[in-house]
Image (tube, rainbow, N blue to C red):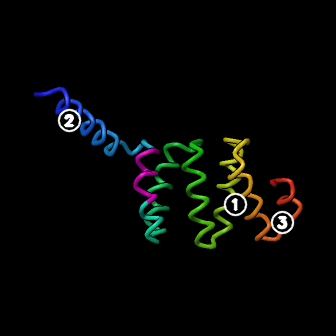
Amino acid sequence: MSRKQRRREEKIARTEAAKQSANNPVYALQRAGPLFQSGQLDQAIKILEDARSHNPEHFDVNYGLAIIHATSGNLDSALPLFEKAVSIRPGDGEAQFNLGRALTDVGRLDEAIAAY
């Protein structure tokens, strides 16, 4: 077996191992992204909710869920997820902005100003 073939097989094996791990938030995000983009929001939410149950402190999982909920107009679900994401990564400007925007949309203007 050539070195190139061996590397390819090793990469395939790593990918398969990641897919089998329910605890892998990166794989969950990779699966949920295309679902979100194609409008299959319920399926994307289900995948990320499962990932969040195993990784409650993972920024991208919380933020991804918040974005999906906000996109679908479910700000009651989005807000605590944006807040969690900001608490995990306080310096993330995009997360801060989206939290502020969601707070504005629900009329919590004083909190929105503080979030911006």
Q: Which residue extends farthest left? A: 1
Horizontal side, residue 64 vs residue 107: left or right: left
Please tell me which residue lies in front, 1 or 53: 1
Q: Is residue 91 above or below residue 95?
A: above
Bin the neighbour count of mark 2 within 10 Å (Cα to Cα): few under 14, some 14-19, many 20 and up.
Answer: few
Q: Which residue is mark 1?
A: 79
Residue in the picture at 24% in, 37% down:
13
Which residue is disc 3 drawn over? 108
What is the spatial separation of the Cα atoms under label 3 and label 2, in whole angstroms? 53 Å
**Residue 61 location in percent, x, y?**
54, 50
Residue 9 numbered tag = 2
Chain part drawn in magenta = 25-33
Q: Are marks 3 and 2 in contact (CB under 8 Å)?
A: no
How many neighbours does mark 3 have within 10 angstroms: few (below 14), some (14-19), or many (20 or more)?
few
Q: Which is nearer the eye, 15 or 106?
A: 15
Gap in angstroms between the C-alphas marked 3 and 1 = 11 Å
Q: Position of residue 48 (x, y in %)?
A: 49, 55
The image quadrant of residue 64 is: bottom right
Dividing the picture into quadrants, the one containing residue 56 is: top right
Q: Amino acid at mark 3?
A: Arg
